[in-house]
Image (cartoon, rainbow, N blue to C red):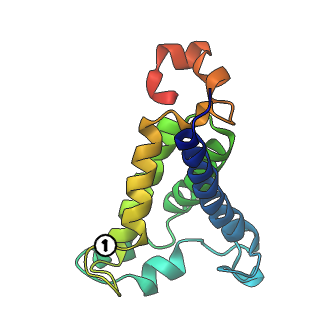
Amino acid sequence: METNTSKVWVIIRILLGFIFLWAAVDKIFGLGFSTPPEEAWIAGVSPTFGYLKFATYGPFSGMMQAMAGNPVVDVLLVGGQLLVGLALILGIGVKVAGYSGALMMLLIYLSRFPGEFNPLIDEHIIYIVLLIALAQVEAGKVLGLGRMWSQTDIVQKYPILE
């Protein structure tokens, strides 16, 4: 039986999934929101170069700038965003998606630390808390494919994939 609390977690799961999925699709195709079409990955432009090279600051900026434009980092970022987004929307692999998404948010947070408007808490910290919470509450089993996914052989063998 679905409770109001589980419905709230479903809404949070799907909305966060859409944020990750949208970020990936926009970087790949340059939909003109964050990424202009001429700067899309399919146009041959690195999805990490501009941000990591020119928008980072703080104590971790040197490390971030050194990764700018690296093809492995490009694939990890966009592939991670795509997979986390799809997993959250579909409700499969919510645990691993939650932890992976939280790690991505932590790295983005550290790339511009301290924050511009608040030196400690910004939206990335809120995303981290919500993503870790999603990994704990079995949010994929309500209005998602999580219940079916959790009964597969691979998830039975490796419960972190739930």
Q: Residue furthest left?
A: 59
Depth check, front residue: 47 or 22:
22
Residue name at image x 62 percent, y 53 percent: 17
Q: Label 1 sits on what residue type?
A: Ile
Q: Is residue 84 above or below residue 135?
A: below
- Location of residue 139 by image quarter: top right
Estimate the x, y position of residue 123 in percent, counting from the top left. 43, 71
- Please identify the quadrant where the N terminus is shown: top right
Neighbour class for label 1 at 10 Å: few (<14), some, many (≥20)?
few
- The answer to whether residue 53 is left or right of residue 40 is left
Let me know if residue 36 appears in the view: yes
Describe the element under mark 1 as helix, strand or loop: loop
Residue appearing at x 41%, y 45% in the figure: 133
Residue under circle 1?
Answer: 121
Q: Is residue 130 left or right of residue 41?
A: left
Q: Position of residue 81 (x, y in %)?
A: 58, 56
x 67%, y 21%: residue: 148
**Vertical placement of 7 versus 106: above or below?**
above
